[in-house]
Amino acid sequence: MNNSVGPDHDLRHETTSSKLFEKGFDTMEVRTITDHKTLQMLARLHI
C-alpha cells in the first residue's frame, strides 16, 4: 500500500523540512511545523 499523497505534496514537505533543518530547527520542531504525524513520516523524506 502506497501512503504517498502525491509527488507535489512530498516535494513541498521535503523542501520545507530541509530548509528548516538548514536553519537549525531540531527534528521535533520541524515535525510540528510541517505537520508530519510521526517521526517516521518525516524521516522518510530525509533518508
Image (cartoon, rainbow, N blue to C red):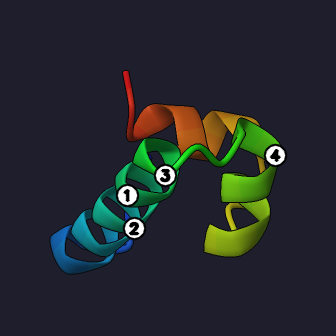
**Residues at badges 1 and 2 in contact (C-beta under 8 Å)?**
yes
- The mark lying in front, picked from 3 and 1, is 3
- Circle 1 SS class: helix
Q: Amino acid at mark 1?
A: Lys
Disc sitting over residue 19 in the figure? 1
Residue 36 falls in image quadrant = bottom right
> Which residue is disc 2 drawn over?
16
Q: Amino acid at mark 4?
A: Met
**Residues at badges 2 and 3 in contact (C-beta under 8 Å)?**
no
| Between discs 2 and 4, the one toward the N terminus | 2
- Circle 4 SS class: helix
**Residues at badges 3 and 1 in contact (C-beta under 8 Å)?**
yes
Asked whether residue 3 appears in the rendered view, the answer is no
Q: Amino acid at mark 3?
A: Lys
> Which residue is disc 3 drawn over?
23
> Which residue is disc 4 drawn over?
28
Q: Is residue 21 left or right of residue 41?
A: left
Residue 7 falls in image quadrant = bottom left
Question: In the image as oriented, which residue stretches furthest toward the top?
Answer: 47
- The mark lying in front, picked from 1 and 2, is 1
| Between discs 2 and 3, the one toward the N terminus | 2
Asked whether residue 33 appears in the rendered view, the answer is yes
Q: Is residue 30 left or right of residue 43?
A: right
- The mark lying in front, picked from 2 and 3, is 3
- The mark lying in front, picked from 4 and 3, is 3
| Distance between the alpha carbons at the discs numbered 2 and 3 | 11 Å
Q: Residue at x 49, y 52 (%)?
A: 23
- Quadrant containing the C terminus in the rendered view: top left
Residue 39 falls in image quadrant = top right
**Whole-percent x, y for residue 8 in the image:** 19, 78
Seen in the picture, residue 34 relative to 23 is either above or below; the reply is below
